[in-house]
Image (cartoon, grey):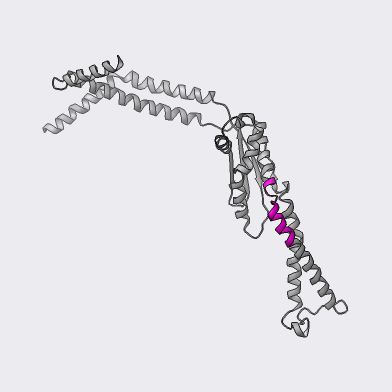
Amino acid sequence: MDVEAQEAEISLLDLLVVVAENIKLLLLGPLLAGLVALGIGYALPQNYVSQAILLLPSTNSTNSTNSAQAAAMMTSPLVLDPIIATDPELNAKPIETARIALAGKLKAAVAKDGLLRLDATATQPQAAQALANAVIDNWLKSTVPGPQDRADLEKRLSYASNALASVTTLLNTLSVDGAVSLGKPLTRGEAGTSLVGLGELQTRYLNDVLGIPRSLQGLSRDVVKQPPTLPTEPVSNKKALIAVMSTLGAGFALLLFVFMRQAWRNASQDPETAPKMARLRAAFGARKA
């Protein structure tokens, strides 16, 4: 056996001896830390989650885009600030801190089926449900257009109404004995325009006349397909995982402490390093004094 192999064997043997001498500390310490962490996990307040499901109507953009925008809006200051104003605990905090704390209790995400799911978390079932309802109510208020958007929509509605009336009158005028020739040109001056095109215009203006008033009113509660639920069971706070991670962390920390303590002792007994260790003790002692 060469010298390097012999030194490695001795070093490994020394490590095993250190572990054996401190086996009680290395076993009982992590076990105690795990039990304490488990107790803390049971002592932590329980959380309840209320879930609501919404389906937004399609507009010019895709339904998933509308839902994604709504999900982002539900955790925006426009929705959060009115809730903070009515909550004494949150209202006592700085506004940015309160927004972060409240947003941490909410999760709004769009699933693959296009449905928007809102989760609200609180320490009581009724509080979780009330929070979800408050978020939905404030978000619905945010869908009501502002003054400038309202003015533009009203102009569009007025134009669409007049255009619809004009197109309808023209179609009625061009009807002959109640029968309409769909492929027939309108007049000699409008040879390129057919009654089919007029029918398409009528449909488009009718959609505007029907849709713009709904946009002026904002979205209603009809988009809520599943009202916020009243949770009956708390969500798990992963007590077992907390205990296991605490046990492993404490075991590693104690093992490192044991090896460092042994290395300190060995260095103190070495004639070459003993003076340096004494100087370190004196320096730390002087600082403590």
Taking the spot 63% from the left edge, 43% from the top edge, the residue there is: 78
Q: Is residue 86 left or right of residue 24?
A: right
Residue 18 horizontal/vertical position (percent):
26, 22
Can residue 17 be seen here? no
Q: Quadrant of the N terminus?
A: top left
The residue drawn where x is 31% and y is 23% is 257
Q: Main secondary structure of the magenta part?
A: helix
Of 38 and 139, the residue lying toward us: 139
Whole-percent x and y of residue 277? 20, 20
The spot of residue 285 in percent (x, y) is 27, 16
Whether residue 247 is visible, yes or no, is: yes
Q: Quadrant of the C terminus?
A: top left
Does 97 appear above or below 78?
above
Q: In the displayed image of the protein, which residue is found farthest to the left?
A: 2
- The quadrant in which residue 181 appears is bottom right
- The boundaries of the magenta stretch are 141-156
Task: Give 139 or 157, whichever is nearer the viewer.
Answer: 157
**Residue occupying the point 65% across, 42% down:** 52
Number of numbered labels in the structure image: 0
Q: Is residue 155 magenta?
A: yes
Q: Nearer the viewer, residue 245 or 23?
A: 245
- Residue pictured at 68% horizontal, 55% vertical: 149
Specify whether 241 is left or right of 157: left
**Occupied quadrant, residue 24:** top left
When asked about the image quadrant of residue 20, the answer is: top left
User: Is residue 63 rendered magenta in the image?
Assistant: no
